[in-house]
Image (cartoon, helix red, strand yellow):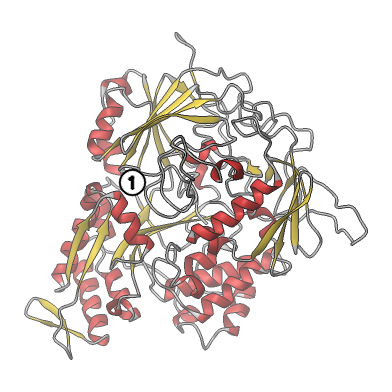
Amino acid sequence: MDLARLRKGLVVALAASFMAPWAMADEPKWRYGMAVVGEPQLPADFQALPYVDVNAPKQGELKLAQEGTFDNLNPVIDRGAIASSVTMIFETLMKRSEDEVFGTYGLLAEAVAYPDDMSSVTFRLRPEAKWADGQPVTPEDVVFSLNMLKQHSAFYSGYYRHVTGAEKTGDREVTFRFDEKNNKELPSIVGDFPILPKHWWEGTDSQGKARDISRTSLEVPMASGPYKVASVQPGSGIRYELRDDYWGKDLPINRGQYNFRTISYTYFSDTDVQFEAFRAGNVDYRQENSSSRWATRYDFDAVKDGRVTKEALTNPFRAVGVMQAFVPNMRRDIFKDARVREALNYAYDFEDLNKNLAFGGLKRVDSFFWGTELASSGLPEGKELEILNELKDKVPPEVFTKPYANPVNGDPNKVRDNLRTAVGLLKQAGYELKGNRMVNSKTGQPLGFEILLSNAGQERTVTPYINSLKKIGIDARIRTVDASQYINRVRSFDYDIIFGVWAQTMNPGNEQNDYWGSASVDRQGSRNYAGIADPAVDILIRKIVFPPSREEQVAAIKAMDRVLLANHYVVPMFYSGEEKIAYWNRIAHPEKLPEYGTAFPEAWFAKQPGK
């Protein structure tokens, strides 16, 4: 799953385990929320989320910036570049609290129930839930949404592959059926997808043409959420307005949120120009992803006199494990040999990059669940060792004998030793240095590849790696393309190496199949960027999704982490473990931020003039 894609980002899949059983003749026991461990933290009569300011004013404009461009407002399909935050005009059946790792509460649905074997789940819709045209949100809308998302989105098709269908089972009830039992995550994740208006999508546009949900579109879609699209400048800007007639503004799950009257995005093709727009006061809020810029360029007057606030927050990472890496595409023959992939790691000089480009502000990632209690370390023992022993003939032997560690550079001697090790690994894989070129010993074909990037700002980080690879004769090149082309090439696996980022929750589940499961290798649009098809990983994913206990789930997660690392599927890069934000004093966040997020922009607000 993902958190935004990394912010919203990213989709967080959590489970539910508190429903009472129901027999064929029994009425289902309806509940107001779900939680993977125990009960939801908030009581049934909660009045608002703990971190919001229920008295926050509904006023002002939030001006934001986005890099790249967009050509699509249709949230269903995997084509085109979707406009920033367009999903906030839609709603889901359930909504999550950023104060909880596992809690989720009713939004469009007022109640939820499922049987003991988790073979299905039923949601009861709120009678007051309405579309922007005043029509009620219906079970037919929910069924339509699931069918369209599974039909037209590779991501949703994979993520919900165990959902065999949905049907109307009451005037305001919809039931999802599953093709397997006791998958604790399924009841929860079907509450996460955007619900679409069936009657609108099956209607005609302003020119009388039938709408086509399978195509990109810049027509403003009908929705039921707190905001509406007020204006669109294709590729360059989009503006949202708060709906005064929003049906859900007084729900406890929504109180103190959606406080800006308008939210606008301006698109920039250049990262530096985007930063200058923020510095000039034309953008209110910035999430900084460059440690060097954070260290050297936030010394302008507005920061010094307090008009701009800088904060480095750990909140969003307290329950999120992140792997950021160079990802070799094993669908390419040159990357099929694990020794080649391992050699690429020995050629990566993180210490030099961190010192010279990031001013020491980064940390090397050494786990697919980095920064959390789910990350493997040391040698396997206990339950984890038992699980790995069952797979002894399917995993690299070093899983049992050698804790994973990235090569360490930092001085010329270490750099030389690591490059020498890389050359040795390549020799074992059938390559040799001839002159200043690394070539295939049998064919004479030079070893070379392309690192695909989506913006020029990334080149600064990649260039030192390119130079290091050239020292051992590898012809590595950078190819930077526009955002739309990049998205399409990644979806179709048309690349040699890319940047990959996976965000993990504390309850990994069905999304692991999309990340590294064999079934996702050839499914375009999946997040199996590396092309992993490993029987041991498939078995471990099943153990993660169907654990007899939390203890055994954690053991299986750590075991899978070890296997992924030992196969050198990626070259781990870095992360700071902090969300670096800066914002002008025109806006503010609640006094208490949530434990596991920043609640931006939902719980933020525009300050009263003079305050």
Looking at the rendered structure, the kind of residue marked 1 is Gly
- In the rendered structure, the answer to whether residue 117 lies left or right of residue 501 reads right
Provide residue 394's location: percent of width, then percent of height: 51, 85
Query: With respect to residue 279, does 425 lie above or below?
Result: below
Which residue is label 1 attached to? 361
Indicate the quadrant where residue 565 lies: bottom left
- In the rendered structure, the answer to whether residue 120 lies left or right of residue 356 reads right
Q: Using the image as rendered, state which of residue 572 and residue 21 is in the foreground.
A: 21
| Name of the residue lying farthest toward the bottom | 442
| Name of the residue lying farthest toward the front | 208
The residue drawn where x is 41% and y is 20% is: 585
How crowded is the residue under tag 1: few (<14 C-alpha within 10 Å), some, or many (20+)?
some
Indicate the quadrant where residue 510 lies: bottom right
Provide residue 485's location: percent of width, then percent of height: 29, 54
Query: With respect to residue 390, does 13 lie above or below?
Result: above
Q: Is residue 459 visible?
A: yes
| Name of the residue lying farthest toward the right | 25
Provide residue 452's location: percent of width, then percent of height: 26, 60
Provide residue 536's location: percent of width, then percent of height: 53, 80
The residue drawn where x is 61% and y is 78% is: 387
Q: Using the image as rendered, state which of residue 550 and residue 27 is in the foreground.
A: 27
Query: With respect to residue 530, does 574 lie above or below?
Result: above
The residue drawn where x is 58% and y is 21% is: 244
